[in-house]
Amino acid sequence: MIRTITIGDISTDDLGIYVTEGDHGTPAPRIITESIPYRDGSYDFSRADGSLHYGDRSMSYSFAVKGMTPEETQDRISEVLTWLNSGGEIRDEYISGWLYDNARCTSVSVEYLSEDRRVAKIAATFTASPWLISEHGYDPTIEPPKSLTSTALFSSAEYSDDGKTAVMTYQISGGSMVRRSELAGVDITASSPVKTAGTAGGYFYAVIEQDTIVLTYKSDTVNIKTMAESVPSAFRLTVYPAKYGRARRL
């Protein structure tokens, strides 16, 4: 199988080039130690905030570029150089379902492999965020940047006669993840089309592509109508760009 990688929306297949080598590297943890006078050894503060953090991932790829004439090969090389420097997300079919985020090309070299200059090798190195990002799975426990987080309260609600079922409509910008803490004794479902929805880590979440989401709250014991009328903030959603809710791994 011929290996294909994609940067942004353009793949090696689109460019008519071949991946000859590829290494996605392994991110190294950031180890922070301090020596204290009159103490033996040093102290490790790498997990001072409770988490271990990692440096950028280093990656490298080599490509074969061929043309019918030297001029065609040079045109292709120029096109590939522009593509390599476009940056963003890199997808490698050898790691299906995951992508490298915030990738940027740091160096490129071109070597002609034939005397007629119709065949060339392009070697490129990249740095990227340390985490592989899932293209499919989501984890609402991942905290996005606070500056990108907002909240939304339901704009309308319909209740059953006994008050134990509520259908609430929220106005949300498309391409977002919404989440909220699970309510004891209450089932929450997304009753309008969503990209994905579920529960994890004590949260209910849904990823939406449209500007509206409809949630149904249902309980055998809790009067949801009374709760919503007395404490409407209990039904507030946290909203942030869906990309920050993607599951990740090293």
Image (cartoon, helix red, strand yellow):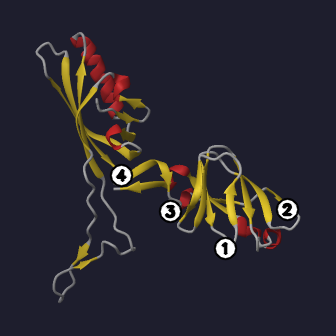
Q: Which residue is mark 2?
A: 160
Please identify the quarter of the rendering in which residue 42 is found.
bottom left
**Amino acid type of the residue tagged 1 in the rendering:** Ala
Pair 1/4: label in front: 1
Residue picked out by circle 4: 129
Question: What kind of element bears circle 3?
Answer: loop
Per the model, the C-alpha gap separating discs 1 and 2 is 19 Å
Q: Name the N-terminal-most of marks 2 and 4.
A: 4
Q: What is the C-alpha distance between the residues marked 1 and 4? A: 37 Å
Q: Alpha-carbon neighbours of circle 1 within 10 Å: few (<14), some, or many (≥20)?
A: few
Q: Residue furthest top?
A: 69
Q: Residue furthest bottom?
A: 38
**Residue 184 x, y percent position in the rendering:** 67, 73
Q: Quadrant of the C terminus?
A: bottom left
Q: Residue at x 69, y 45 (%)?
A: 211
Q: Which label lies toward us, 2 or 3?
A: 2
The secondary element bearing badge 4 is classed as: loop
Relative vertical location of residue 164 with respect to residue 120 in this rendering, above or below: below
Q: Earlier in the sequence, mark 2 or mark 3?
A: 3
Furthest toward the left, the residue is 115
The residue at which mark 3 appears reads as: 143
Residue 1 locus on image (x, y percent)? 28, 30
Query: In front here: 177 or 103?
Result: 177
- Give whichever of discs 1 and 4 has the lower sequence position: 4
Q: Percent from the top left, x then y, of residue 126?
A: 28, 43
Looking at the image, tell me whether mark 1 or mark 3 is earlier in sequence order: 3
Q: Quadrant of the rendered structure where residue 151 is?
A: bottom right
Specify few, some or many for label 3: CA neighbours under 10 Å numbering under 14, 14-19, or 20 or more.
few
According to the picture, the residue beneath numbered tag 1 turns out to be 184
- Work out whether residue 37 or residue 162 is closer to the camera in this orientation and state it: 162
Question: How dense is the environment of label 4, judged by Cα within 10 Å: few (below 14), some, or many (20 and up)?
Answer: some
